[in-house]
Image (spheres, rainbow, N blue to C red):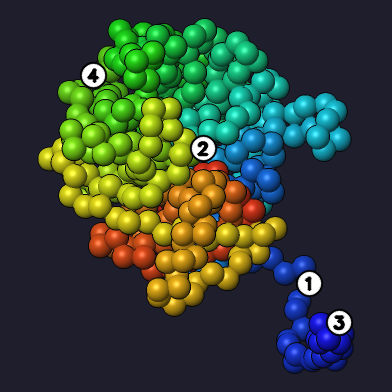
C-alpha cells in the first residue's frame, strides 16, 4: 500500500507544473547606497563564507567566500569596503598555501584587490579577535600562529603588506586607537603594539596581569564600548579595559552573576556569548545552568545588563534558532504550545542551542542568535526581548555573527 501511494506521489510531482517567470542568468546586483538598519553577517565554516541577511525580510542579500577558518569581516566607516583575511590552498584542501587580506567592494561584494601576507595566520574556531582594523582605519592586523605568535600588518589604504611583528606569549588582536592594537598574553597581561606611519612597530608596552589565567581566565570574546573593551571571565566577572590613553587603564571589576545566580549554577557560555548595544549601553550575555568548564555550552537565556548601573535589567528566555539540513531550514515553526515541543527537541542537542548573539546598532535594535551546527537564525526585539521570527540565509553552520553597520541613518 505504501509503495502505491509513494508511486502516485512521484507521478503527481512529475506532472505538476508551475508557471514561473524565466530567471535571467548572469545578472549582477549591488547593495543600496543607504544601508539597512537590520542587516547582519553570518559566518559559515563549512561553506567557508559570510552571508549578508536582512533580519526583517529574511532575504539573503549576498555572500563572500572567506576561505579556510571562520570568516570574519572588518568593516570601515570611511570607505565603502570590506576587509577579509583569508587562507586558500592551490588544490582545495592541500597544495600551496596562500594567505591574503582581500578587499571587497561593499556595494557589489566583488573582490577589488588583495594583499598577500606570510602563510601563518591563525585558523581556529574563534568568531572574533583573529584580526582587527585600527581606529584610524589605515591598518589591518592579522593574528599569526605557527605556533610562534605575531601580527601581520597590512596597509589597506596603500594596499601593501607593511611587515610582521613578533609578539611572543601574546595572542589575538583588538583595535586600541589610531595605529595601535592590543593583545592578550598568557600570564594575564595586555600587550599594546603601536605602529608608525609606515605600519612598522614604533613601540610596545606590556601591562601587569589584569586577570588570573589559571583560576579565572577571560574569554577572548570581548565587546567594545566606546574606548573600553569589556572582557568577561569564565566566572562571569567583567574586566573593563580603557585603551584611550597612552597606557591601558583597568577599571573596577563587576559581576554578571549575583550569589543566588551562582548558587543556582548559572554561567556564561557559547561560541559568541556577548553583544553590546552602544546607544543604550545594554550588555547582552548568553547564560546557562552548568558546572565548571561549561563555558562553551549553549545559552538558554539572554541576560541584559545596564553597563552604567552595573546591574541586570532583563532576562530573555531563548528559543532555538532552528535547524537546517544542507542549508535548507526544517520547518518547525509550529503554533503554540507545539512550538515549545520543537524548541525542546532542538534544545536537546547542545550544538543546536543558542551559541552566538549579536545586536543591531540602531534606535530600534534587533537581536539575532545562531547555533553552531545550524544555519538558521532567530530574531528578537532588542528592547522588549520578544521573539519575532526565524530566518535562514542558506548557511549550514553559524560560528559568528556581525552587525557592523549602524543603521539607516548612515549612508556609505
Relative to 344, 375 lies left or right: right
Could you tell me how far apart the alpha carbons at marks 2 and 3 are, in whole angstroms?
48 Å
Viewer-side residue, 400 vs 1 = 1
Q: Which is in the foreground here, disc 3 or disc 1? A: 3
- Asked if the residue under mark 1 is in contact with the one under mark 2, i.e. CB atoms within 8 Å, the reply is no
> Which residue is identified by label 1?
25
Secondary-structure class at tag 2: loop
> Which residue is identified by label 4?
249
Whole-percent x and y of residue 68? 69, 36
In this rendering, the answer to whether 403 lies above or below 201 is below
Residue 329 in view (yes/no): yes
Whole-percent x and y of residue 370? 49, 52
Q: Which is in the foreground here, disc 3 or disc 4? A: 3
Identified at 69% across, 65% down, the residue is 28
Query: Which mark sits nearer the N-terminus, 3 or 4?
Result: 3
Query: Which mark sits nearer the N-terminus, 3 or 1?
Result: 3
Q: Which is in the foreground here, disc 2 or disc 1? A: 2
> Which residue is identified by label 3?
3
Image quadrant for the N terminus?
bottom right
Whole-percent x and y of residue 173? 47, 25
Number of labels in the image equals 4
Could you tell me how far apart the alpha carbons at marks 3 and 4 are, in whole angstroms?
72 Å
Q: Residue 175 appears in which quarter of the rendering?
A: top left
Secondary-structure class at tag 3: helix
Identified at 16% across, 41% down, the residue is 311
Secondary-structure class at tag 1: loop
Amino acid at each position: 500500500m505504501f509503495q502505491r501511494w509513494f508511486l502516485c506521489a512521484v507521478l503527481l510531482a512529475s506532472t505538476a507544473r508551475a508557471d514561473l517567470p524565466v530567471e535571467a542568468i548572469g545578472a549582477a546586483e549591488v547593495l543600496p547606497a543607504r544601508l539597512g538598519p537590520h542587516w547582519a553577517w553570518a559566518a559559515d565554516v563549512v561553506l567557508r563564507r559570510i552571508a549578508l541577511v536582512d533580519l526583517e525580510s529574511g532575504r539573503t542579500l549576498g555572500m563572500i567566500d572567506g576561505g579556510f577558518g571562520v570568516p570574519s569581516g572588518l568593516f570601515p566607516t570611511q570607505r565603502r569596503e570590506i576587509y577579509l583575511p583569508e587562507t586558500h590552498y592551490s588544490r582545495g584542501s592541500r597544495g600551496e598555501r596562500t594567505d591574503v587580506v582581500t578587499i571587497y567592494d561593499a556595494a557589489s561584494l566583488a573582490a577589488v584587490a588583495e594583499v598577500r601576507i606570510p602563510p601563518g595566520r591563525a585558523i581556529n574556531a574563534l568568531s572574533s579577535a583573529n584580526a582587527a582594523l585600527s581606529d584610524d582605519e589605515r591598518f589591518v592586523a592579522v593574528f599569526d600562529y605557527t605556533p610562534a605568535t605575531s601580527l601581520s600588518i597590512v596597509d589597506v589604504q596603500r594596499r601593501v603588506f607593511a611587515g610582521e611583528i613578533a609578539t611572543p606569549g601574546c595572542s589575538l588582536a583588538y583595535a586600541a586607537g589610531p595605529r595601535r592594537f592590543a593583545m592578550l598574553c598568557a600570564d594575564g597581561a595586555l600587550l599594546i603594539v603601536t605602529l608608525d606611519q609606515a605600519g612598522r612597530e614604533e613601540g610596545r608596552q606590556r601591562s601587569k596581569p589584569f586577570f588570573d589565567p589559571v583560576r579565572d581566565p577571560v574569554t577572548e570574546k570581548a565587546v567594545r564600548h566606546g574606548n573600553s573593551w569589556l572582557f568577561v571571565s569564565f566566572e562571569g566577572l567583567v574586566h573593563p579595559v580603557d585603551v584611550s590613553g597612552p597606557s591601558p587603564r583597568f577599571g573596577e571589576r563587576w559581576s554578571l552573576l549575583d550569589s543566588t545566580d551562582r548558587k543556582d549554577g548559572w554561567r556564561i557560555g557559547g561560541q559568541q556569548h556577548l553583544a553590546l548595544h552602544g546607544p543604550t549601553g545594554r550588555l547582552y550575555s548568553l547564560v546557562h545552568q552548568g558546572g565548571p568548564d561549561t563555558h562553551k555550552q549553549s545559552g538558554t537565556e539572554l541576560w541584559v545588563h545596564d553597563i552604567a548601573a552595573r546591574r541586570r535589567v532583563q532576562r530573555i528566555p531563548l528559543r532555538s534558532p532552528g535547524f537546517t539540513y544542507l542549508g535548507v531550514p526544517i520547518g518547525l515553526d509550529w503554533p503554540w504550545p507545539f512550538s515549545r515541543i520543537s524548541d525542546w527537541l532542538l534544545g536537546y542537542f547542545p550544538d543546536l542551542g543558542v551559541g552566538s548573539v549579536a545586536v543591531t546598532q540602531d534606535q530600534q535594535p534587533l537581536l539575532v542568535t545562531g547555533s553552531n551546527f545550524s544555519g538558521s537564525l532567530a530574531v528578537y526585539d532588542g528592547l522588549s526581548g520578544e521573539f519575532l521570527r526565524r530566518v535562514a540565509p542558506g548557511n549550514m553552520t553559524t560560528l559568528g555573527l556581525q552587525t557592523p553597520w549602524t543603521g539607516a541613518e548612515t549612508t556609505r
